[in-house]
Amino acid sequence: MSLVTLCFKHRPPTIPILWICGRRLGARNLNTTKDQHRADQIFAEALDRPPASRPAFIETTCGEDTQLRDEVTEMLAHYACAEDALTKTRTTHRISGRPEIEQVDIRTDTGRTVGTCRLDGRLPDDGLFERWGTRRQDDGPAAVLSLARQRLSLDDARQVGLHAAMLLRLDHPGLPRVLEAGTVDLGRGPEAFFLVERIDGEAIAETRATSTGELRRRVEQLIPLCDALQELHFHGLFHGRLTTSRMLSQDKGEVRLADPGLLASLARAIPDSAAAEKLRDYGGAPERPVLSPLALDGRIDVFDLGRLIEQWIEGHNGPLAVELGRIADKATAHDRQDRYRGGGELGDQLQSVLTPSDRGSEMNDPLSGLTPLTATLLMVIIAAAAFVLGVALDGWLF
């Protein structure tokens, strides 16, 4: 038996372009955002059920709302169409450079060719994933091979293939490129793997900003990161593990995510898996531990960024901090319906507090770039100097 991946490098041409996993990219049939959110929620819950029981579930849940029922039914129909197209796609390559070998333990095979890459060495594990540094044979970018330590059933492997194809569609400079993804049998049964462009850089700051100027610079870094998250959210995906260690500042100042949400993708593919359990235990948004991964969305990422902003502004009370506090309050609302809908909306709000007029008013404040302690000391020194000067003038004049 050769080692074969269920790996999709390119979008299969048979998938309807206006739909991705049941989510239409153009106009929706429903009248309001609230109605569409309800349809998305029912759609996600229906996917958790066996296909044969979905029609009855939709009928019961939607009740007499025929428009809602028709929308969810149509979403499921397109989801099934996309899934069918993907699962009938032919495999693209073998995971081993020596197809006559039936079993390969990559943990002892530094230097071996894996797919289109050469293994360079083991990297620290990332939760569920074993990680290897790799180099593409075609002089492509350095990449990280992440191998999920969980055996998959054939049906699970099929679902991983579907969600892997969704990751391969992502295209944004703030996200690492997913070069290959799917499932592989390394002698332990089918396992999920992801080959992702390697992103190096320094983690952005997590603690409070020391000055208003530094706070503004951090917000300026966060805005393009919100845009990168919107690419995930637009495709019905989310990251799920937004920590500063995964937000890396590179040499030219741009900030990129270290991974495109691999754990979340695996958890959505297999909702009863170890990946889903780790996603639930990660903390953050209150709905995370109680909802299925298929019912979660980009608002858990919005929550995580809101918490980060709260840490940055701690101890600040200037105009910029006040505005950022208002944004953080909405981003971390307990009810996700009250949060920003995705990274794009959050980024727009952050951009609005950095308008030229705001920057100009703070640039006119000579203390805006100082820490609160330094500004206080400077004010004391100025007051003392003014007092001494007043006493001297009083003695000279009178």
Image (tube, rainbow, N blue to C red):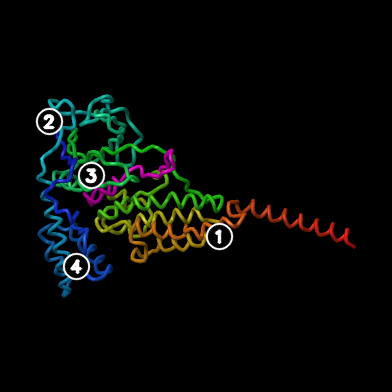
Numbered disc in front, either 4 or 2 = 4
Q: Indicate which disc residue 168 carries.
A: 3
Q: CA distance from mark 1 to mark 2?
A: 67 Å
Q: In the rendered structure, which amino acid carries the disc numbered 3? A: Leu
Discs 1/3, front: 1
**Cα separation between marks 4 and 2:** 47 Å
Point out the image quarter for the C terminus. bottom right
In this view, 66 is above or below 201: below
The residue indicated by pointer 2 is: 2
The span from disc 4 to disc 3 (Cα, nearest Å) is 28 Å
Q: CA distance from mark 1 to mark 3?
A: 44 Å
**Residues shaded magenta:** 248-275
Q: Which residue is mark 4?
A: 29
Residue 100 or residue 324, whichever sits in front: 324
**Helix, strand or loop at mark 2:** loop
Q: Which mark is residue 261?
A: none
Assign the N terminus to one quadrant of the image: top left
As shown in the figure, which amino acid type bears the numbered disc 4?
Answer: Asn
